[in-house]
Amino acid sequence: MLHQADTRRAPAAISTQAAILALDGITKTFPGVKALSDVSLELYPGKVTALIGENGAGKSTVVKTLTGIYQPDAGTILMDGQPTAFPAPQAASDHGVTAIHQETVLFDELSVAENIFLGHAPRGAFGLIDVKAMTRKAGEILTGIGATIDPEHKLKDLGIASKHLVAIARALSIDARVVIMDEPTAALSHKEIEELYELVESLKAQGKAILFISHKFDEIFRIADNYTVFRDGQLIGHGAIADVSEAELVKMMVGRDVSQIFPQRAAHPGDTILQVTGYCHPTEFEDIGFTLRKGEILGFYGLVGAGRSEFMQALFGITRASAGEVEIDGQKVRIMSPADAVANGIVYVPEDRGKQGAILDLPIFQNVTLPSLGRISSRGFLALAEEFRLAREYTERLDLRAASLDTHVGNLSGGNQQKVVIAKWLATQPKVIILDEPTKGVDIGSKAAVHEFMAELAGQGLAVIMVSSEIPEVLGMSDRVIVMREGRMVAELSEAELQPETLVRHAAGI
């Protein structure tokens, strides 16, 4: 095991300036689990500090502590070197601490300006909201981050990237000194990510301290000045990003070398299990056709808007295809709903696990057994012991980390939420499993676990369809790859034909 003393860098290597905000010896315990154990963190003016760790390492707990959502059980929060406390989110905001989350809650029916200043709008006579002042200030903030968005427009009229900029403007509307960015690029295109990098540089130039949380090492090495690594709620190492390699960071994160990200496996596809012919949708895709064999991993690759997820949702019965046929084991089947798909052995793990894959307010065991209630019921009554047995079997196979099966899914890290969704569908004993962006927002250690399990499933004869936007994942896991562009199949590549340049050329129409 890699000990803290082995990897900790001297604080002098980070910055000669005083930290704006620091955590010193912070401990936070929840029933059955110590989320943070005597951790420290320093955020310096004009610097980006990357907080790195696997899902469940304690990153989210740190963010909630810094923003006043959680109160530490021990340790000290220091602002400009002085002990302070954030008994509520408003206290953190008053001290200039703001967070930009991966999934910031915004309100479609309100204007851009109203979303930015919700809860702290400028007031005029008689305490009424000064709409003109609010609109003007919102426009100034948007201009300051390079966003050409009309502050009077309704939020529902904006695209995803523009909504993300509104969320950033909202966070900056409090005149922040410390900006926390939690997976800020998850929903952005390459161009929008570059624009975010420019915004980060602008914030650094203004002397703001930035905490940057990302699972993407290219982002970390692109914009971070410093790093801090957590593992299992403990501080493992910190220092200047220029003094560390990617391999060293990975070893600190997972406590071992990850020399081979993708599992070595020999593919031995069996008989054809699924055949799709001429599948069409009026607006999303056209003439999709392919075969899938037992024990095979079939990758689907394409750029944003290619229609991959839309096709998978139709194959699973969430939406209706306008034409086409599906055969399972050589028999034609009609898939008019997800229930039809599950009954015929097709299951779908969606990209948006929080909204489509799990019920966050229910415990783990109830999420896992939800599609299998008929198997664990007798005369209309649930067999609780059988429900726990089934949930335990599949969560243990996926190495899900939680205090207990009673833990609500909403309290789990992103990687463990993904494991719950996969376990839920595996418990139905499917023939075909569709994994839509299975490692999106998942750290490198959990990615390796998901990849190993995918290989294990294929080795047991399950047919796997994997939709992924990550070229290394497509190349490392797929036996064959179908490339889509603008709702159509444009290439089907064998393993021998798989090259990064080939995928990109087909996907971009070059």
Image (cartoon, rainbow, N blue to C red):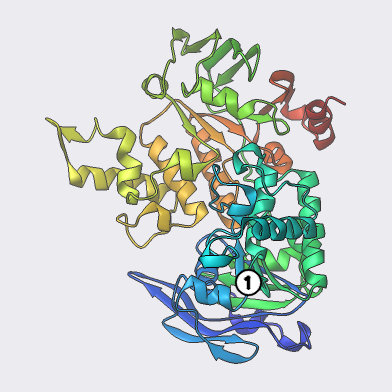
The residue that appears at 41% across and 24% down in the rendered structure is 338
Mark 1, secondary structure of its residue? strand
Q: Residue furthest right?
A: 510
User: Looking at the rendering, which quadrant does residue 359 occupy?
Assistant: top left
| Circle 1: residue type | Val
Residue 322 spot, x, y in % from top left: 55, 10
Up/down of 350 relative to 450, above or below = above
Question: In this view of the protein, which residue sits in the foreground, 119 or 162?
Answer: 119
Image height of 175 relative to 319, above or below: below
Q: Residue 10's x, y, as percent?
A: 72, 87
Residue under pointer 1:
229
Of 283 and 290, which appears nearest the observer? Answer: 283
Nearest the viewer among 244 and 485 is 485
Relative side of 226 to 215, left or right: right
Name the quarter where the N terminus is drawn: bottom right
Query: Is 119 on the left or on the right of 482, as rendered?
Result: left
Task: Please give left or right for residue 416 compared with residue 2 in the image.
Answer: left
Please tell me whether residue 380 is drawn above or below residue 151 in the rendered image: above
Residue 258 seen: no
Which residue corresponds to the image point at 59% horizontal and 53% vertical from the top-left? 114
Characterize the local packing of mark 1: few (<14), some (14-19) or many (20 or more) Cα atoms within 10 angstroms: many
Tell me the residue at 52%/52% (across/down).
415
Residue that lies at the very extreme toward the front in this rendered image: 125
Q: Is residue 242 visible?
A: yes
Which residue corresponds to the image point at 52% horizontal and 26% vertical from the top-left?
Answer: 313
Q: Residue 233 at what x, y percent from top left?
A: 50, 72
Q: Quadrant of residue 496?
A: top right
- State the residue in front, 45 or 151: 151
Identity of the residue furthest to the left in this view: 379
